[in-house]
Image: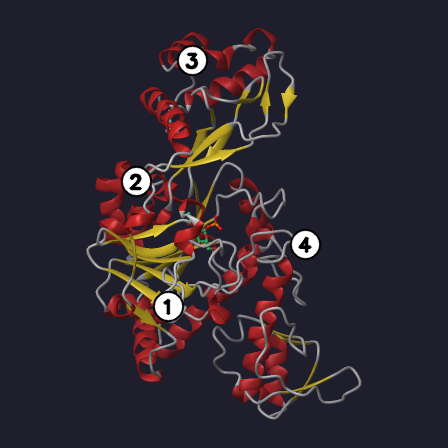
């Protein structure tokens, strides 16, 4: 919470904490080594006094309000009328082509950047490292970060080939105290996956203290406050703290594709989405998919009192999520896939004028703490409040918002849970990507053979839980959305498992 240049003395820290009713943070001071006390002072120095007071007060109040029905928006939620949703499914080829062309044009002129929200801890997935470093078990062994980096390279290339440019899509990566160090190291160790390091800009979002139901900061060690990132809506403060908007301006970036790290099918800087938003004159946009089932853990894009808003899955009542229209269809079905479009001007407006109005969302969590004797206690029931801002809470400030419906099987398969869970696991992510590449290869005219060179009969439709009959992985460096495969695969026999990387593509060209 906040940045303070210099470290406080013990007396200053004590005074600051006491003013905010948080004197207990220093209760173990006498027992700390010099090093330990320094760490604690450093942490306290980062807390800004007025914000601290307000934060603890708001958290305690939020906790008392949390279980009551006040503040729920369910009764005021209305679906976005279908005519206000752009749609890949319902648009003809020509329209998609026009949008895609516009997107590539903007990319070729260096006006587009991507911004990744990667400050989360991946608690549900249960790994101790940033989610982007996860390898879902593809034949290539690529991690989410590598797949994303290669998609950036490919879409730059598509724009260059079309427009004779040498463009750059800068990659802004918002990390947190948990993820910055390992993410930086991972990129360095992997030579930025072929991207130029100066075009990968990492910055850190703020951390804020977790607070008990009594409004007191929780200590997770004798010398450590339990801190958590301020939610993906911490983006707007982090843009200012780290002068990122200035960096974008210097580079001439006008349009941002903002996304969260865990979707294995994410289309980086998707030209079709960018082009659609630009042509519609939007300052803010969101990709949506048709919700798969009422309790699916995705936010819902809807109207609340005539304003666009996302109601998060954790804040909607099950009865509301289950509402159906006359044909049996889900009424509130525009599922948020955390892929947003913003103009730089809009981000600047939000950062300068609206940030302080963003809603604080309350999460009641189990937070490990030290008791009065200094013993670590792993709470068995929720004991702490974490306050978070959400990236989509700025939609209401938009002058022209657009929603854009995309196909789930082409664009959305998030990695949320560890294997063993029924959905959104490494297995389902891997399956979605391999199924997509299998479909692309079939559409391009490829024939699959098994290990004994026997033809594998093609399967043109598969359910979500079904593995494709042949294994096919196509490097993003070869194809971004299935384009350019016909000249490589038409009437070719492809032995499963088939890995189409750049070398294999060259070989295939030679044998044509
Ligand atoms: C605050 C926020 O952005 N929440 C998003 C985000 O939620 P997670 O809690 O990270 O799974 O990703 C979901 C899509 O994977 C989206 O539906 C939801 O609205």
Question: Height in image: 483 above or below 154?
Answer: below
Query: Label 1 near label 2: C-beta < 8 Å?
Result: no
Q: In terms of secondary structure, where does tag 2 sit?
A: loop
* Quarter occupied by residue 73: top left
Real-space Cα separation, disc 1 to disc 4, in angstroms:
30 Å
Q: Residue at x 54, y 56 (%)?
A: 145
Q: Residue 439 has which mark? A: none
Q: Is residue 497 visible?
A: yes
The mark nearer the N terminus, 2 or 1, is: 2
Q: Residue 13 has which mark? A: 3
Query: Label 3 near label 1: C-beta < 8 Å?
Result: no
The mark nearer the N terminus, 2 or 4, is: 2
Q: Residue at x 45, y 19 (%)?
A: 216
Real-space Cα separation, disc 2 to disc 4, in angstroms:
36 Å
* Left-right relation of 157 to 435: left
The mark nearer the N terminus, 3 or 4, is: 3
Q: Residue 358 has which mark? A: 2
Real-space Cα separation, disc 2 to disc 1, in angstroms:
26 Å
Q: In terms of secondary structure, where does tag 3 sit?
A: helix
The residue most toward the left is 399
Discs 2/4, front: 4
| Spot occupied by residue 135 in the image (x, y as percentages of width and height) | 63, 57
Query: Label 3 near label 2: C-beta < 8 Å?
Result: no
Q: What residue would you read off at disc 1?
A: 405
| Spot occupied by residue 239 in the image (x, y as percentages of width and height) | 34, 43
Residue closest to the eye, 501 or 422: 422
| Spot occupied by residue 474 in the image (x, y as percentages of width and height) | 58, 74
The mark nearer the N terminus, 1 or 4, is: 1
Q: What residue would you read off at disc 4?
A: 420
């Amino acid at each position: 919470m906040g940045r303070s240049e210099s470290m406080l003395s013990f007396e200053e820290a004590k005074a600051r904490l006491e003013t905010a009713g948080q004197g207990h943070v220093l209760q173990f001071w006498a027992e700390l080594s010099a090093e330990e006390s320094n760490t604690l002072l450093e942490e306290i120095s980062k807390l800004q006094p007025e914000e601290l007071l307000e934060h603890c007060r708001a958290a305690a109040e939020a906790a008392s309000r949390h279980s009551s029905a006040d503040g729920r928006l369910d009764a005021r939620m209305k679906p976005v009328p279908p005519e206000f949703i752009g749609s890949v499914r319902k648009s003809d080829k020509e329209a998609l082509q026009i949008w895609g062309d516009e997107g590539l044009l903007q990319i070729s002129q260096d006006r587009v950047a991507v911004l990744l929200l990667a400050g989360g801890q991946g608690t549900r997935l249960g790994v101790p490292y940033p989610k982007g470093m996860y390898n879902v078990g593809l034949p290539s062994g690529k991690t989410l970060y590598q797949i994303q980096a290669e998609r950036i390279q490919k879409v730059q290339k598509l724009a260059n080939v079309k427009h004779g440019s040498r463009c750059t899509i800068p990659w802004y990566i918002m990390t947190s105290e948990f993820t910055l160090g390992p993410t930086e190291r991972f990129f360095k160790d992997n030579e930025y996956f072929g991207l130029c390091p100066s075009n990968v800009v990492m910055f850190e979002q703020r951390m804020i203290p977790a607070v008990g139901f009594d409004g007191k900061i929780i200590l997770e060690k004798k010398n450590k406050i339990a801190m958590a990132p301020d939610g993906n809506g911490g983006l707007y403060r982090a843009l200012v703290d780290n002068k990122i908007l200035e960096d974008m301006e210097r580079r001439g970036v006008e349009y941002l594709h903002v996304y969260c790290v865990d979707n294995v099918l994410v289309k980086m800087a998707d030209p079709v989405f960018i082009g659609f938003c630009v042509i519609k004159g939007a300052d803010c946009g969101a990709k949506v998919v048709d919700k798969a089932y009422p309790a699916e853990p995705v936010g819902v894009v809807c109207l609340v009192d005539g304003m666009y808003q996302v109601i998060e899955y954790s804040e909607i009542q099950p009865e509301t999520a289950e509402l159906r229209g006359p044909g049996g269809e889900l009424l509130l079905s525009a599922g948020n896939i955390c892929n947003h479009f913003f103009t730089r001007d809009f981000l600047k407006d939000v950062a300068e004028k609206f940030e302080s109005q963003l809603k604080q969302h309350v999460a009641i969590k189990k937070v490990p703490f030290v008791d009065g004797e200094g013993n670590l206690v792993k709470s068995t029931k929720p004991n702490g409040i974490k306050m978070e801002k959400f990236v989509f809470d700025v939609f209401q400030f938009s002058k022209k918002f657009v929603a854009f419906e995309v196909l789930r099987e082409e664009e959305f398969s998030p990695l949320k849970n560890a294997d063993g869970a029924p959905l959104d696991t490494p297995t389902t992510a891997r399956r979605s990507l391999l199924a997509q590449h299998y479909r692309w290869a079939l559409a391009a005219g490829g024939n699959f053979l098994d290990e004994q060179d026997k033809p594998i009969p093609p399967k043109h439709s598969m359910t979500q839980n079904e593995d494709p009959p042949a294994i096919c992985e196509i490097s993003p460096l070869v194809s971004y959305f299935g384009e350019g495969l016909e000249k490589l695969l038409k009437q070719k026999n492809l032995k499963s498992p088939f890995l189409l990387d750049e070398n294999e593509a060259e070989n295939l060209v030679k044998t044509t």
